[in-house]
Image (tube, rainbow, N blue to C red):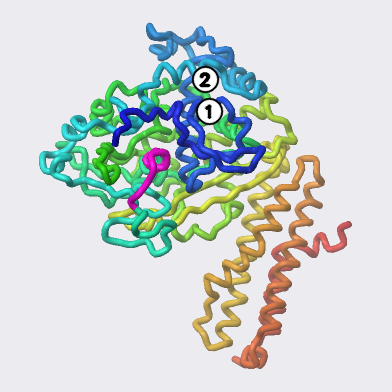
Amino acid sequence: MDRKSYNLLTEPWIKVLAKDSGDTVSVSLIDVLQNARQYERLAGEMRVQDFAIMRILLAILTTVYSRFDAQGEGYNWLDYDSNGYQVTRVKIFEDDQRQELLDSWNQTFTSGSFSRKVFDYLNEYSNRFDFLGEHPFMQVTHDEYNSLVSADKKIEKGSGQVLIKQINRSISESGNTSFVFSPKSNDEKDKIDLPELVRWVITYQGLTGVTDKTKVQSKEKYSISPGWLFQISPVFIRGSDLFQTLMLNLLLFNPNHQGEFNLQKPIWEETNLLSYAELRLSNIFPNDIAGLYTSLSRMLHISWKDEGPQIFSAGLPKLDIEQNPFEPMTTWKKNKDKKRNIDFVPAVKSKWSISKAMWRDFGQYVGTDYSGNEVEPGIIAWLRQLKNNGYIDDSFHVNVSSVSFINDGNATSQLPVEEIHGELSLYADVLFDDDIAGRWTVRIEKIVEQIENVGKMYYGFLSNINGLEGGKGQASDHEMGQFYDLLNQPFESWLNNIHADDNRDMKELEWRKTLWELVQNLAKSQMDSATSKVIRGKVEDQVQTNIFTIYNSFMRRVWNSLELEVFKNAK
C-alpha cells in the first residue's frame, strides 16, 4: 500500500445518516463532532458497529468534559500536567464538584454544539488517530507485535492471522466454515476498503470471539478475551439526532459510584501498547469510562500487501467484571455464582433471547426495585440526575435502546450468531416518577409479570389442545412466539403514551382490556381451526374434555388473573 497516513480526524470513515437528505454519507471524526446536529444517527454496516464507534466518540467527550468545563476552562479542583491536557491529581471530589460537572453538561447540551476544547484536544493527539502512522490506531507496530508473541508466532512465521471475513462481523466466517447467508460473495469476502476496515477493527476489538489461538505470551495461563461488548448487555439512549444521542449518553461521573472520580485514560493516551499489555497480563484493567470504552481484546498488527491487508492478532486476558462494575451501558442481574465476588453481573443475552422483546425485561432497563435487589444501568441513573436537576423536562421522550450480538454459546468459540436490537420509549416523568406510593415503573413491571403469567396460561391452553390431537401435550416455540409478537406493538404503544398525571388505575385498566381482547381473539382462532378430533375430545373419569371446555377454563383463568371483575363496570 502506497499510503503512509490515514488520519481518522480528517479522513471520511464514519458513516452517518444525514437529516436533511436522508442519505448515508461518510465523514471524518472531526466532522461528525462538529456537525452532529446535522446527522440523525450513525449508519454503518451493523448496529453493533455503530455502538462500538459511538463509544469511541463518547470516550473523547468523556475525557474532555471531565477535565474542562463547557467554556474550555480547567476545573480548579484538578491539577494538570505541563501541556495542560492531562490531569495529574484530583484535589477534591464531593457534591460541589459533581454539580460543576452537571452544570458543564447542561451548558453544552443547551448550546447545541461541542466546545472548541474538544477539537484542540483531538489536534493535540492527532498522531494517535492515524490508522497507518507510527502509532497506528488500536494497533501495534511490527516490532511491538513480535515482542509480544512467542518465537513460533512471529509475523514472519505467518501464523496468528485473522481474515477480513472474520473481522467483518456481517460475515463472521472462519477459514473452515462458510456463512451461507453472507452479504458478500466468496470472491469479495476478504476484500475491503480502508474506511470499512477501520470500522470493523474498532468493532472487532469489542466483539472478538475466542477462535484465534495466538496469545500475548505470559508466564501465567489466562483466558483469552472475547471482547468486552460480548460480556455485557448493551443499553444506550437514542436522541432526536446524533448530538442529542451523544449528550444523553455522556456521563461525567457514574451515579452508581458517586464516591469516585477516576481519571480518564482512553487507549490513545497510553504511552505505548507494550505497557498496556503488561498491565492486562498483571490483571490490572481500566478503571475509567474512557479506558473501558476503548479497551482492546487483541493486539493487532496490519501488514499491507498488494492483495490487501494481512491482519495478525494476539489475544489479551479477559476483562474481569469484578474489576469493572462501573460499566454504565449495560443491564444487570443478581449474581448467582457464589464463586464470583460480586453482587450483580451483566444480564448478557443468549441464543434464547433472540426473539424476546425489550419490554419483557422492563425491570432490567428501568429501576423498579428500590430495596437494593437490583441495579439500574448507569446510563439511566445518569438521566435521573439530569432530570432531578431540571436539565430534561417531564415531557422529554426517553428512548431506551439496546443492541447485542448474540454469540453461539460455545465457550471455545463464542462466535457471533445474530444481532438483536430493541427500544422502549416513555416520558421522563414516567421513567423517573417520584410518586412513591404508586410509582409508574413499579406498576409497569407488575403488568409485565402479569403478561408473563397469562403467557404461561396460554401455553397450557395450547398444550391441552396438542394433547387432544395426540401430541406430546406441549405448545411449540413458534406458537408462543406468535403470542408475544401479537403483544409487542400494542404494549409498546400503550407504554409510549403513559403520562405521569394519567389516572393510573384507569390507564392500567386500558391495557388489561387490550390484553383480554388480544388473548380472546387468539383463543377464538384456535377454536375456529380446531379439528374434529379436538372438538369431539375425550372422556376420562366421567369428565368431558374438548376444545370448548379447554377454552372456557382458559378464558376464566385469564379473566380472574386480570381482575377484570373488579373493573368491568368502570367508565
Residue for point 43% across, 9% down: 84
Vertically, is 12 above or below 514?
above
Q: In the drawing, what numbered circle is on residue 126? A: none
The disc labelled 2 sits on which kind of residue?
Answer: Tyr
Percent of width and height locating residue 456:
59, 67
Task: Find the distance from the CA under tag 2 to the CA under tag 1.
Answer: 19 Å
Q: Quadrant of residue 368?
A: top right
Asked whether residue 191 is drawn in magenta, I would say yes
Report the mark closest to the observer, 2 or 1.
1
Above or below, comparing residue 92 to residue 8 in the picture:
above
335, 511: nearer the viewer? 511
The residue shown at (63%, 50%) is: 445
Q: Main secondary structure of the magenta part?
A: helix
Which disc, if any, is residue 65?
Answer: 2
Up-down relation of residue 400 to residue 384 (above or below): below
Residue 528 x/y as whole percent: 70, 83
- The tally of labels here is 2
Badge 2 marks a residue whose secondary structure is helix
Can you name the residue that lies furthest to the left here? Answer: 151
Name the residue at 67% across, 27% down.
Answer: 388
- On screen, 272 above or below 232? above
Q: Is residue 217 magenta?
A: no
Counting from the top left corner in percent of width and height, residue 367 is at 59, 41
Q: Is residue 522 visible?
A: yes
Residue 376 visible: no
Q: Quadrant of the N terminus?
A: top left
Residue 31's disc number: 1
Quarter occupied by residue 125: top left
Q: Is residue 22 left or right of residue 324?
A: right
Amino acid type at mark 1: Asp
Q: Position of residue 333 (x, y in %)?
A: 48, 46
